[in-house]
């Protein structure tokens, strides 16, 4: 696997919004997993499992080469570990710009996961990775936090090999009656209280519903990917549209 880029290279692109988000996640890192389990009653684990199921394109790893997966905005590496369980043969980079989140994640790596997973500090807007170097890019609950979604999408396209696959699991802005009601009732009331109890940081869990309300819908996100020259191959609504999965491919794989 390639060596990590020097740190200065990864922090240079972070703007004011990014710096706030980075500080917030570093602050809640130690309670982040606990908050997720309490807030979702474990459903987030099932969503991650579902999302990782079709991450690698057909033919990845053919000829004996290890498939390479980038888990972007990997946080405490829960999704990275789920990817490793699903694809034990793959080399996986867990990339995030919060050293605190990655440190919590690295402490969870044991046995074969230590050999296959590398945690690397990086900003999603300026990935310190070569062109066409990954078979798959995965991102769970990270896209909503980005300062410039289009620029970050261009970076994802750049590091994907032709035919490589992008999978995004996210709380897209809700449109249906159930998901809008759930967002208004649960996310704006229960969630901040539970998040505060788990991490001691109320601001981070007031930011979460705000970021969902300000994000794009799943349809608009698909259109954004298409404009960026990715081909959307599927999208799925989870729990009545409260969350969603979008899958896309970099054209040119010859399949
Ligand atoms: C809600 S957490 C999701 C973590 C993990 N993917 C999960 O499913 O639990 C969002 C993560 O995105 C990271 N993040 C936000 N903006 C980023 C950026 N511009 N570059 C890299 N990581 C970023 C944060 O540091 C945080 O760890």
Image: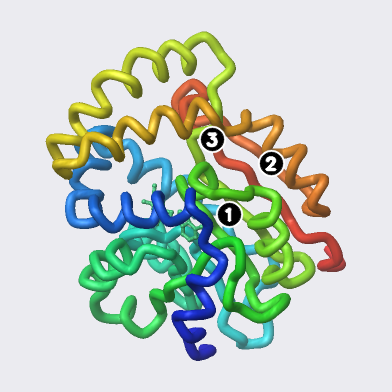
- x and y percentages locating residue 114 in the rendered image: 31, 81
Circle 2 sits in a helix, a strand or a loop, which is it? Answer: strand
Q: Looking at the image, is mark 1 or mark 2 earlier in the sequence?
A: 1
For residue 214, side relative to residue 80 (left or right): right
- Tell me which image quadrant ligand 1 sits in: bottom left
Residue 234 is labelled as: 2
Q: Looking at the image, is mark 3 or mark 1 earlier in the sequence?
A: 1
Q: How many marks?
A: 3
- x and y percentages locating residue 105 in the rendered image: 28, 66
Q: Disc 3 versus disc 1: distance between alpha carbons?
A: 14 Å
Which label lies toward us, 3 or 1? 3
Q: Disc 1 versus disc 2: distance between alpha carbons?
A: 10 Å
**Which quarter of the figure is the C terminus placed in?**
bottom right
Q: What residue does disc 3 label?
A: 244
Q: Looking at the image, is mark 2 or mark 3 earlier in the sequence?
A: 2
Q: Disc 2 versus disc 3: distance between alpha carbons?
A: 11 Å
Say above or below: 100 vs 49. Answer: below
Q: Are marks 1 and 2 in contact (CB under 8 Å)?
A: yes
For residue 121, side relative to residue 201 (left or right): right
Residue 54 is labelled as: 1
> Of 119 and 87, which appears nearest the observer?
119
For residue 28, side relative to residue 247 (left or right): left
Circle 3 sits in a helix, a strand or a loop, which is it? Answer: strand
Way the structure is coloured: rainbow
Say above or below: 201 vs 213. Answer: below
Q: Residue at x 42, y 48 (%)?
A: 48
């Amino acid at each position: 696997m390639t060596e990590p880029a020097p740190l200065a290279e990864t922090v240079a692109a972070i703007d004011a919004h990014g710096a706030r988000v980075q500080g917030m996640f570093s602050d809640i890192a130690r309670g982040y997993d606990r908050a997720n389990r309490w807030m979702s009653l474990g459903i987030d684990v099932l969503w991650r499992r579902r999302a990782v199921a079709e991450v690698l394109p057909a033919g990845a790893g053919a000829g004996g080469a290890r498939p390479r997966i980038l888990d972007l905005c990997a946080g405490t590496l829960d999704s990275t570990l789920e990817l490793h369980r699903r694809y034990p043969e793959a080399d996986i980079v867990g990339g995030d710009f919060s050293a605190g989140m990655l440190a919590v994640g690295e402490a969870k790596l044991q046995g074969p996961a230590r050999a296959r997973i590398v945690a690397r500090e990086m900003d999603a807007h300026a990935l310190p990775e070569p062109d066409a170097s990954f078979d798959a890019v995965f991102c769970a609950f990270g896209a909503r936090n980005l300062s410039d979604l289009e620029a970050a999408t261009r970076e994802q396209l750049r590091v994907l090999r032709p035919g490589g696959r992008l999978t995004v699991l996210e709380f897209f802005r809700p449109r249906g009656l159930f998901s809008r009601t759930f967002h208004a009732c649960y996310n704006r009331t229960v969630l901040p209280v539970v998040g505060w109890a788990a991490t001691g940081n109320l601001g981070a869990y007031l930011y979460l519903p705000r970021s969902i309300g300000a994000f794009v819908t799943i349809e608009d996100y698909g259109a954004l990917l298409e404009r960026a020259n990715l081909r959307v191959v599927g999208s799925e609504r989870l729990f009545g549209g409260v969350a969603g999965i979008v899958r896309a491919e970099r054209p040119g794989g010859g399949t």
